[in-house]
Amino acid sequence: MNAETEKRIQTLKRWIGESSSIVFFGGAGVSTESGIPDFRSVDGLYHQKYKYPPEQIISHSFFEAQPEEFYRFYRDKLIVRGAEPNVTHRRLAELEREGKLKAVVTQNIDGLHQLAGSRNVLELHGSTLRNYCLRCGKTYGTEIFDGTEGVPRCSCGGVIRPDVVLYEEGLDQDVIERSVQAIRQADLLIVGGTSLVVYPAAGLLRYYRGNRLVLINMSPTSMDGAADLLITAKLGEVFSRV
């Protein structure tokens, strides 16, 4: 790590010490160090070969038209087993316990923030850990997929679907409103591990009113020019030092 990056990390550490209302906004890059592939990296899901493009498979219309193919992909690629929180997840949970971090706004669906101990986690795109029957509303965990194939069915006969936001579907309005409120009230907004290309989630950053916007990412984003502090490093390297 070069001297300039180290200097910027120390600035972030100081800002964290001076802040009392931190919000963290994160994407797939938060979980890659836990062994969960992101969607847009060179070896991410979007670059692998399937009968259909992943963007098409995890869309509402594809789920309706070809549920068996949807669930084949879902079992294979989106249900994560055995992944553990990494240093970023754990440090964010510590900051919440210290009363500094007020919310984690995440685009991830893996539940690792909660597993690390974070309580106020706003899941913009839902969670693979929750599933429900489209007919009666009965809820299920991931065990519904264990040792099964095809379309999962409820005891009432209805189709069980994951509580995740598919392409072509709108985000939960309550989660959006709570995220906007948290970001508006933040005195430090840390954005990490996201390419900021997925909307409307990425658009939430415009609600930040402070002057300490921190971007941590390995590759450039469209918001780099708006950042008060830009750190080009892996999240684990940063959060192990702050």
Image (spheres, rainbow, N blue to C red):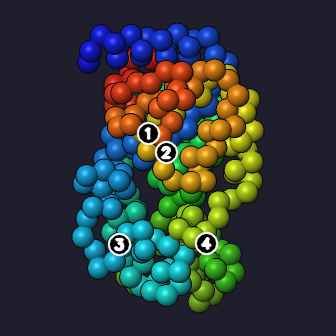
Residue drawn 25% across the image and 65% down it: 48
**Residue 212 coordinates in the image, percent (x, y):** 59, 21
Residue 196, which numbered label? 2
Q: Residue 98 is drawn in which quadrant?
A: top right
Element under disc 4: strand
Evaluate if marks 4 and 1 touch, with contact meaning CB atoms under 8 Å apart. no
Residue 70, which numbered label? none
| Quadrant occupied by the C terminus | top left
**Residue 63 coordinates in the image, percent (x, y):** 50, 80
**Residue 172 coordinates in the image, percent (x, y):** 68, 59
Does residue 135 appear in the picture of this structure? yes
Evaluate if marks 2 and 4 touch, with contact meaning CB atoms under 8 Å apart. no
Measured Cα–Cα span from mark 3 to mark 4: 25 Å
Residue at the disc numbered 1: 221
Evaluate if marks 2 and 1 touch, with contact meaning CB atoms under 8 Å apart. yes
Indicate which disc, 2 or 4, sits on the residue closer to the N terminus: 4
Indicate which disc, 3 or 1, sits on the residue closer to the N terminus: 3
Element under disc 1: loop
Element under disc 2: loop
Measured Cα–Cα span from mark 2 to mark 3: 21 Å
Q: Amino acid at mark 1?
A: Thr
Q: Amino acid at mark 2?
A: Leu
Query: Which residue is outermost to the front?
Result: 225
Residue 53, which numbered label? 3
Q: Amino acid at mark 3?
A: Pro
Q: Are there few (<14), some (14-19), or many (20+) residues within 10 Å of tag 1?
A: some
Residue at the disc numbered 4: 132
